[in-house]
Each structure stands twice: as structure tokens, then as C-alpha cells.
Amino acid sequence: MIGDHLFVLLRLRWLQVRRAFPVYGRFLLAFAVLAATWALRNALIHDATYAPWVAASAVLLVMGLHQRRRDHRFLQRHLPKAHVAMAVEYLVLVLPFVCALLLAAVRFWALLPLLVVAVPWSPVAHSTGVRAVWLRDHIPTRLFEWRSSLQATHPWTLLVWLLALAFCWLPVLPLFLLGGIALVAMGAQEQCEPRAMLLATANEARALLRTKVYGAVRLMLLVQLPVLIGATLSRPDWWWIHGLFGIGMLVLVAYAVVLKYANYRPNERLEANGANVGVAAVFAILPGLGLVPLIMFLTELPKARANLHAYFHDHHH
């Protein structure tokens, strides 16, 4: 039936969320989305000039997600209406932005996020050849995830970062652009390396996690610090928002690394991790709820150590 084709991706996301979280976790996720929508609505009522930037950020967020999808070819081969199914998925994704804009009585700008229905028909940049060699040389080889991510997404991520830096004087927009870069970095953690590469990186689980987490946090800090400093100089009264956002992004990247190794299986791609990281990202951007990703990080850390310990010391793997 036509309806089955339209909502197949939404059903898949729902199954991923149900598999990843218990009932209370799903209630917390729903609460976080509602709280984020209400907070955005209050910000827009306080200053309606934020509306075009909020609307544009929603569109840019979806465009960034569309570019980093790994299942384009699979969906086009196996779904009769793949583009329409993706359009429905993207509409649901921007629904909180649309609701916030409507509740703030800026109805004209509420129409802009609806343009995401055209995104599935936009061209997708597939990586070919070796890119961004001059940038990749500054990333340690042990952080191969970041090197491969830069290779796959260059020059788009560099362009997004330059836009965030150029428009750091604007409200909201640079934070959304930095959030998009963080999502790309976290998505790179879904691919598991072979066990031989794991053993070549460190000699035991704690050392590996320390190397990977500290390395990822340092790189993310270098990416976001210039933008957040510029944004704070432009809006000094927002220093605490920028500070909490920056800390939240660092915790998110660290969580993505630990989550990968908590579920590590050699040579496999951990697609289900995306749902967990997405939930952590929602909490990270909400003032007062930033402790939730930290708790998730601390919960997964012992699991990652135990899982890696087996691969370092069990010769049957």
C-alpha cells in the first residue's frame, strides 16, 4: 500500500528507539522534545528577529543529515517511493521547529522549514579520491574515524564551519552549524575497525578509551572554540548558553566514542547507535538537562571497558 511506503522510515526509527530505550527513556525523550520546542517558542516570543535564523537552521540541519546518510542507494533500490519516504521523515524532524514558530506567532517563517520536502531530490556528494590531505595530516592516525569522516565530507564540513565562524555574531545559527559538525563527528564513530587495528592502537582497554576519548574531545574543542569565542564576544550576555552548549558537544562526542566500544564488533557498522546519540544530543542542547548525556556516558564507560577487555585478552576473537 502507498501508506506503507510513505511511513516505512518512521516505523524503522520507532523500532530503533524501542530497541534502544525502555519505556521511561521514551517518555524522557518525548519530554525533551516538548521542552526544546517550548524553550524555542519562548526565545522567539522574546525576540522575533531570531525566527529566520531558526527556520534556516532547521533546513540546514536536514540538509546536513541528508548528506551524511549511508543508505541512499539501498533505499532507492528497495523502496518504490524512497524520496517521498525520506521527505516524510524530514518533515517529522522539523516539526518541533514549525510548532515553535507557529506558537510564537511568526507564521510566515514557519513555512520555510517545510521546504525540506525537496531535500531528498537534491544531489548527494559521494566521496571520490583523497580529499583534505592538508587537514587530515594534522589529525593523529589513531583517530582514524575523524580522518575518514573528513575525507568523506570535505569540503562540506569545512564550509559549514566557515559559515559558523562568519555568522558567529548571529543568534542560534552558529550553534546549529556546530551541532551539525558534531553530528558528523559522532556518526563517524559507528564504524568498527578490525581487531588488528584495535590492538595496534593500544595495549589494553583503558588506554584505548583514554586515547580515543581525549583525542576526540580535543579535536571537537579546537573546532568549536573559535566560533563560541566569537559568538560570546558578539553577545556577552549569552556566555552561559555558549558555555553549556560547548560542554554539551564535548560530552556528546565522548559519549559517541564510549558507546561505540561498548557495542564494538570488528568490521561491523553500529547503525543502532545513531538513535542513542540522537537522544543524547536532544538533552545536551537543553539548559538544565545537560547532565543526562554525562550520565549516559558514565553508564556506558564500564560496559566499554568490559567489552574491549574481552577483545584484548581473548585470543578466540
Image (cartoon, helix red, strand yellow):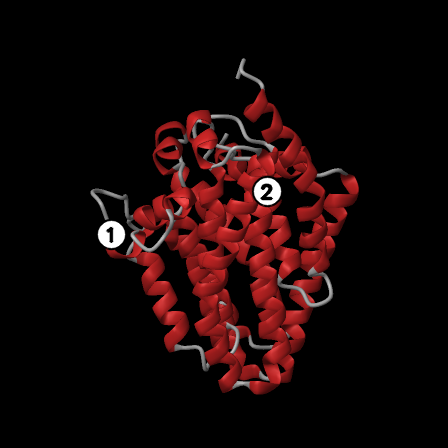
Residue nearer the viewer, 239 or 208: 208
Q: Residue at x 59, y 67 (%)?
A: 245
Q: Residue at x 56, y 60 (%)?
A: 249
Residue nearer the viewer, 277 or 135: 135
Q: Residue furthest right?
A: 24
The answer to which quarter of the image holds residue 316 is top right
Q: What is the tally of numbered marks visible in this picture?
A: 2
Q: Is residue 177 visible?
A: no
Q: Amino acid at mark 1?
A: Val
Q: Residue at x 40, y 56 (%)?
A: 63
* Tag of residue 80: none
- State the residue position of label 2: 258
Mark 1 is surrounded, within 10 Å at the Cα level, by few (under 14), some (14 to 19) or many (20 or more) other residues, namely: few
Q: Is residue 274 above or below residue 156?
A: above
What distance separates the C-alpha of mark 2 from that of mark 1?
27 Å
Mark 2 is surrounded, within 10 Å at the Cα level, by few (under 14), some (14 to 19) or many (20 or more) other residues, namely: many
Q: Residue furthest top?
A: 316
Q: Residue at x 38, y 53 (%)?
A: 119
Residue nearer the viewer, 13 or 299: 299
Disc nearer the start of the sequence (2/1): 1
Is 53 situated left or right of 33 in this image? left
Q: Position of residue 87 (x, y in %)?
A: 45, 48
Helix, strand or loop under label 2: helix
Helix, strand or loop under label 1: helix
The answer to which quarter of the image holds residue 138 is bottom left
Residue nearer the viewer, 288 or 315: 315
- State the residue position of label 1: 133
Q: Position of residue 117 (x, y in %)?
A: 42, 53
Q: Amino acid at mark 2?
A: Val
Is 29 situated left or right of 98 in this image? right
